[in-house]
């Protein structure tokens, strides 16, 4: 049975790693939290690729949607609530940036 393909290359090699049961449990839990397979999670950790919790990715998607709605309200109201909309959009953007930075920092502990 062929392995999956990531990017341009097939995943056709395997390694074995010995670890304690507690370490394996943590690896499985961390991968689950990120919404990734253990293999994909390990590859990302080994090669220092970004890992973001699935919940954070969903939150960023929702925040972007809300930002679009805020912009729509601003346009429809012809800028009536300009100061409030600017503050709301700034808050949404800052939180998206915070979640994105948190995703880049996962695995740096």
Image (spheres, rainbow, N blue to C red):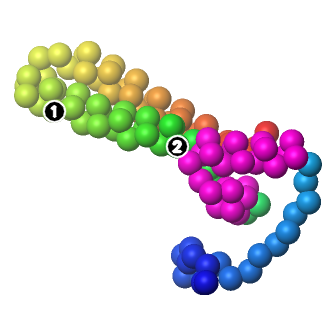
Query: What x and y, as percent, mark residue 40?
Result: 64, 61
Is residue 4 left or right of 63 when viewed as pictured? right
Secondary structure type for disc 1: helix
Secondary structure type for disc 2: helix
- The residue drawn where x is 26% and y is 15% is 84
Q: Against 61, is 18 above or below?
A: below
In the rendered image, the quadrant that contains the N terminus is bottom right
Residue 7 is inside the magenta segment: no
Q: Nearer the viewer, residue 1 or 46?
A: 1
Q: Residues within 10 Å of mark 2 (few under 14, many from 20)?
A: some
Query: What x and y, as percent, mark residue 45?
Result: 73, 55
Is residue 90 left or right of 67 when viewed as pictured? right
Q: Which residues are magenta?
A: 21-45
List the residue tagged with mark 2.
54
Name the mark on residue 72.
1
- The residue drawn where x is 70% and y is 42% is 29
Please say if the residues under marks 2 and 1 sit with CB atoms less than 8 Å apart: no
Q: Nearer the viewer, residue 61 or 21?
A: 21
- Write down the quadrant of residue 17 in the picture: bottom right
Q: Residues within 10 Å of mark 1 (few under 14, many from 20)?
A: few
């Amino acid at each position: 049975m062929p392995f999956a393909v990531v990017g341009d290359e097939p995943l056709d090699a395997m390694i074995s790693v010995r670890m304690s049961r507690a370490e394996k449990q943590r690896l499985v839990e961390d991968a689950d939290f990120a919404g990734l397979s253990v293999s994909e999670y390990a590859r990302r950790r080994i090669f220092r690729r970004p890992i973001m919790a699935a919940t954070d990715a969903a939150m960023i998607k929702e925040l972007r949607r809300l930002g679009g709605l805020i912009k729509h309200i601003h346009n429809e109201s012809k800028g009536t609530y300009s100061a409030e909309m600017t503050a709301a959009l700034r808050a949404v953007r800052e939180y998206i940036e915070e979640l994105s930075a948190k995703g880049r920092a996962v695995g740096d502990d």
